[in-house]
Amino acid sequence: MLLNTYHISWLSLSLAYILLAFPLYIFWKYKTGLVKETLISFARMTLQLALVGLYLGLIFNLNNVWINIGWVFIMIGVATITTTQRSGLKGRAFFVPVSLALLVSIVLIDTFFLGAILQLENFFEARYFIPITGMIIGNCMERNIIALNTFYDTLTKEYEVYQYYIANGASRQEALRPFISEAIQKSFNPLIANTAVIGLIALPGMMTGQILGGSAPGLAIKYQILLMLGIFTASLSTVYITLRSVTPHLISASGILLSKQQVSNKTVKQLSVYELHQELVSLSVGKQKVNTDPSFS
């Protein structure tokens, strides 16, 4: 069942920008320095959405399998670049693990969502394939950024704890398990909290969009439930694969934790002799402390 959808003219849409007057006034009054950034952000948002709207209209009309797949790969590439930049891990070595984590998650969830559940005749139907995949990629990117930042920052602050585990016979994966656990918790707590109150505090975007687009509320709810399940599983899959695969690029075989600058500009082999010596001395001191700790006698 389709409901009536009201058309929004360009004139009506332009009037909506009046809403920015109050935020901009507050920013200006309190000298926050956010006026220029806000204007630029909304100008970019408007231009980008207008261009995407034109481009998606063309893609939907063509509905070509290879163009649809190519667009998804572009989204994955942009999401990967954003993830590495926002996490401060900009080395080329991180592009492949992050992009592969996204790709694997998308393939698994899209196959289940579009193939097994919706059972589309054309799996790559632009109307379904691109919007659903895009929403999943966006959420995976957000979780991944939080997880990577938490993982590296916690490991940096508590590196002695990692050395402690290693010195007492733990494998690298066993020593990293608490740090991975905290990264997953910090990344997914907001998503779990948001999922628990959907429908009570706010209506989610896809459901609202479908209702405004004329779909029956019952159908919109079904799609939203499927999407939330897909987003949650794909996000966890992406975060898990990423955290497991980036570790060799953060910690060398000698147990050296590389700084973000070293990760971006160097390889492990390019570390200076002085840096290597300092790290090995630190590791040695950590072992001596563990051996003399009375709690382990």
Image (cartoon, grey):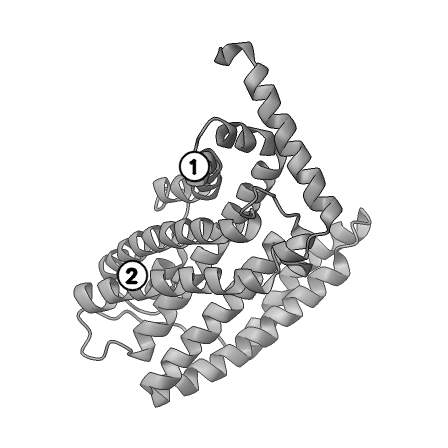
Taking the spot 47% from the left edge, 26% from the top edge, the residue there is 168
Q: In which quarter of the image is residue 191?
A: top left
- Using the numbered discs, state the Cα–Cα distance from disc 2 to disc 1 in whole angstroms: 32 Å
Judge by depth and name the residue closer to the eye, 191 or 289: 289
Residue 143 placement (x, y as % from top left): 47, 50
Residue 118 placement (x, y as % from top left): 20, 67
Residue 33 placement (x, y as % from top left): 79, 54
Instruction: Say above or below: 145 vs 42.
Output: above
Q: Mark 1 points at which residue?
A: 171
Mark 1 residue type: Ser
Which label number is shown at residue 109? 2
Instruction: Say above or below: 10 vs 101.
Output: below
Judge by depth and name the residue closer to the eye, 177 or 53: 177
Report crowding for label 2: few under 14, some 14 to 19, many 20 or more residues within 10 A (C-alpha).
Answer: many
Q: Which of marks 2 and 1 is nearer the N terminus?
A: 2
Q: Is mark 1 on a helix, strand or loop?
A: loop
Taking the spot 48% from the left edge, 52% from the top edge, the residue there is 144
133 left or right of 81 in image: left
Judge by depth and name the residue closer to the eye, 223 or 96: 96
261 left or right of 207 in image: right
Report crowding for label 1: few under 14, some 14 to 19, many 20 or more residues within 10 A (C-alpha).
Answer: few
Taking the spot 37% from the left edge, 73% from the top edge, the residue there is 130
Residue 68 placement (x, y as % from top left): 37, 80
Mark 2 residue type: Ile
